[in-house]
Amino acid sequence: MPRSGSAAQQDGPGPLSVVIAGGGSAGWMAAAAFARFLERGHAVTLVESEEIGTVGVGEATIPQIRLFNAALGIDEAEFLRATMGTIKLGIAFDGWTAPSSHYIHGFGSVGRDLGLVPFHHLWLRAQALGIAGPFGTHSPNVAAAWACRFKAGPPGGLVHAYHFDAGLYAAFLRTQAEAGGVTRLEGRIARVETAGDTVVALHLADGRRVAGDLFVDATGFRSLLLGEALQVPFSDWSHWLPCDRAIAMPCARAEPLLPFTRAIAHDAGWRWRIPLQHRTGNGMVFSSRFMGEAEAEAALRAALDGAATGEPRLLRFTAGRRQAFWRGNCVAIGLASGFLEPLESTSIHLVQTAIERILAFWPGRAAGPAAVAEYNRQTAFEFERIRDFLILHYWANGRDAPFWRERREMALPDTLAAKLNLWRESGRVVREGNELFTETGWAQVLIGQGVEAGGWHPLADQMTARELGEWLALQARLVRDRAQRMPSHAEWIARVAGAKAEGVAA
Ligand SMILES: Cc1cc2nc3c(=O)[nH]c(=O)nc-3n(C[C@H](O)[C@H](O)[C@H](O)COP(=O)(O)OP(=O)(O)OC[C@H]3O[C@@H](n4cnc5c(N)ncnc54)[C@H](O)[C@@H]3O)c2cc1C
């Protein structure tokens, strides 16, 4: 670093030259955010290589993406038009506990809490009494998802995220970022120049040298700066999350236009189905120990519910994370920082929180070691808690195939084992600190995948069985009626984004 921390304090932080290596979703999300939030003459340069390209997937999100878009001043209708986006209300898990089982992990609330008693305790008691309908019938998002309907709120709206075309999203953000002053350099990074733990410059294949103060490594799985140049090791989590391949393949749009992602279990992993305005995204996620690439491709082709509109693309990955995310003057985001498979659509969210955190811990000319340590601690915590939530889906399976039997028998991380013990002892779920998934999210997956709770909160016993049954039936009816009054998802998209909808003029 050119100046010491104390000199920086005397001078004020001063503008930095920020170099973002990589122009996938992660690189352009960072570029657009920096263009919006960095003032005082910070220079932002993004280097990307069209020849190398991007991972080209990452089309399902969680509701927090709306906060990111709003912070960038992005208009929802314009965004949906530009990215061929659709609404996502949750994820349907098909066949995880038995071949014909299904439930939706919906965003937003499920049922109404009773004073201090979370709703799921009342439902658990009703289940024990044999008077409970499916848990999802109490979720406005789940009811609307099954009915293929959507209405934005408020009032009476739902909690939504998006499906979008990842390439179009990156292009959309690029326009924003370049309009905000970001300089884009096209070129292949051939070498990363370092001095100890500091990245000094990127050397491009055509001989250009790109120097900077702060480097953001968004080079995807290659992790060229943090992983390769600074040699930060990777913690491999494939003993918990063994899927290491995906084959992605788009097909023609299918009707009706579903407002949810589908995650369909198969013998050695699962398959995604993501509805967009112009096509459906599909992908087989599998473990290469249990399924061959040719077999996976054949299974994917056979399962498409429309004519294929592109060639299959094979992606190889390993679940895990870098042991540090920020070292010296280099911070990795996106796939360069680690990878958790897309079962709960969390990767783009991890990019978003990494950017928020970089801005929160923004360095002067020298990033203090305490700030770097805190950044790394928070990021590691976030990764680990999402990891636990993903493992739960695999562990709590009821399928009969070697891949799934092995998942049921695996040793769990202590943090997940503690959560499961609490649930199996008393039906309680506790969200620790800032972990991403809420008690409601955990309860939906635990109940949806048949993990038996050991009881319920004693205060859930205050109603008589009859009162409880009537109250739950009324709540479920209100939720269902509310969903039925909403327009269809396709109509809503047609109206808001001006896109073609099933049987509806645009
Ligand atoms: C199978 C699969 C499914 C996924 N599904 C989802 C999902 O549904 N939801 C979700 O949130 N996330 C999902 N993800 C993750 C998501 O795709 C990524 O988090 C997101 O796209 C960000 O990727 P990235 O920008 O880090 O990497 P990339 O898209 O790989 O971008 C890397 C960039 O670095 C550049 N680069 C690399 N090397 C060089 C070099 N030598 N010189 C110059 N430039 C270079 C590339 O050209 C590119 O621009 C999925 C990932 C996979 C693998």
Image (spheres, helix red, strand yellow):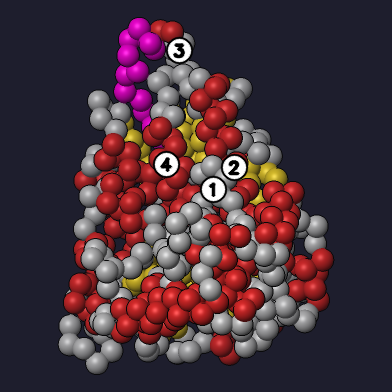
| In the depicted structure, whether residue 250 falls above or below residue 427 | below
At label 4, counting other C-alpha atoms closer than 10 Å, the crowd grade (few under 14, some 14-19, many 20 or more) is many
Give whichever of discs 3 and 2 has the lower sequence position.
Answer: 3
Q: Residue at x 28, y 68 (%)?
A: 157
Q: Residue at x 27, y 51 (%)?
A: 70
Tell me if label 3 and label 2 are in contact, CB under 8 Å. no
Distance, label 4 to label 3, CA atoms, is 23 Å
- Circle nearer the N terminus (4, 3): 3
Q: Does the magenta-highlighted stretch encompass residue 19?
A: yes
Q: Residues within 10 Å of mark 3 (few under 14, many from 20)?
A: some
Q: Amino acid at mark 1?
A: Glu
Q: Which residue is mark 3?
A: 5
**Which quadrant of the view contains residue 370?**
top right
Q: Please name the residue that numbered disc 4 is placed on.
A: 355
Residue 74 magenta-drawn? no
Image marks 2 and 1: residues in contact by CB distance under 8 Å:
yes
Q: Earlier in the sequence, mark 1 or mark 3?
A: 3
Q: Which residue is mark 1?
A: 435
Depth check, front residue: 211 or 368: 368
**Element carrying mark 1:** loop
Residue 428 in which image quadrant: bottom right
What amino acid does circle 3 point to? Gly
Write the start and end of the magenta stretch as one range. 8-21
In the image, what residue type sits under mark 4? Ile
Residue 132: percent from left, percent from top: 55, 80
- Looking at the image, the residue that sits furthest to the bottom is 503
Q: Secondary structure at mark 3?
A: helix
Q: Nearer the viewer, residue 50 or 282?
A: 282
Residue 381, numbered label: 2
Q: CA distance from mark 4 to mark 1?
A: 17 Å
Task: Tell me the SS state at disc 2.
Answer: helix
Crowding at mark 1 (Cα within 10 Å: few <14, some 14-19, many 20+): some
